[in-house]
Image (spheres, grey):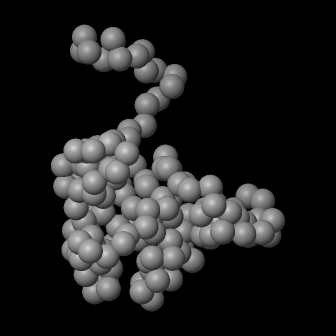
Amino acid sequence: TEDVHVSVRYICMLSVGTLAYASSEAVVSFPALKALSTSLTRPFPCPRYPGTTLPLTPLFFWYDKPHIASTSHYLARVFPSALAISRGEFIEDTIGHRARDQMKEGRWERWATWLYYPSEGEQLCLRHLNGRTWRGRDHEARQ
């Protein structure tokens, strides 16, 4: 609800794989996740910038794709010790699944992961550019 304090510890950028995330099977298939998403998906006011809002929806996974996260949160949840992730492991395969399991158990607040959600999850924020063939914005604009 509006009067509940909501922590933001991680914000992931919307990509092709997370378009319309709040209504995706990854969310609606789990009643607890669907309820949380329904109650929290909205524009949040930005205290530092009066009159500005940031559209967010809860994200029920920890991705290593472009994101913004609190350093203290990283140290507490992702790297609590030198043994948290072994050499060669991926965050999604270890921390991501651990976080999702906890979130499905009702402990989303522990992770407070969000997805930047412009245009209700329909506006793409990230895309892959092929560095070998991409010629820059000016060239794209002319195409």
Q: Is residue 34 visible?
A: no
Say if 16 sits above or below 62 in the image. above
- Residue 95: x and y in percent read 60, 69
- Residue 47: x and y in percent read 34, 51
Specify the quadrant of the image occupied by residue 112: bottom left
Task: Name, please, the residue furthest toward the right.
Answer: 82
Q: In the rendered view, does 80 fall on the left or right side of 27?
A: right
Residue, x 26% and y 74% (percent of image)?
3
Q: In the rendered view, does 75 fall on the left or right side of 57?
A: right
Specify the quadrant of the image occupied by residue 76: bottom right
- Residue 64: x and y in percent read 54, 54
Instruction: Decide which of 112, 19 is in the foreground and name it.
Output: 112
Instruction: Decide which of 56, 84 is in the foreground and name it.
Output: 56
Q: Quadrant of the C terminus?
A: top left
Residue, x 35% and y 67% (percent of image)?
58
Q: Quadrant of the N terminus?
A: bottom left
Instruction: Decide which of 89, 79 is in the foreground and name it.
Output: 79
Say if 87 sits above or below 35 in the image. above
Residue, x 73% and y 58% (percent of image)?
88
Say if 37 sits above or below 62 in the image. below
Q: Is residue 84 visible?
A: yes
Instruction: Decide which of 142, 84 is in the foreground and name it.
Output: 84
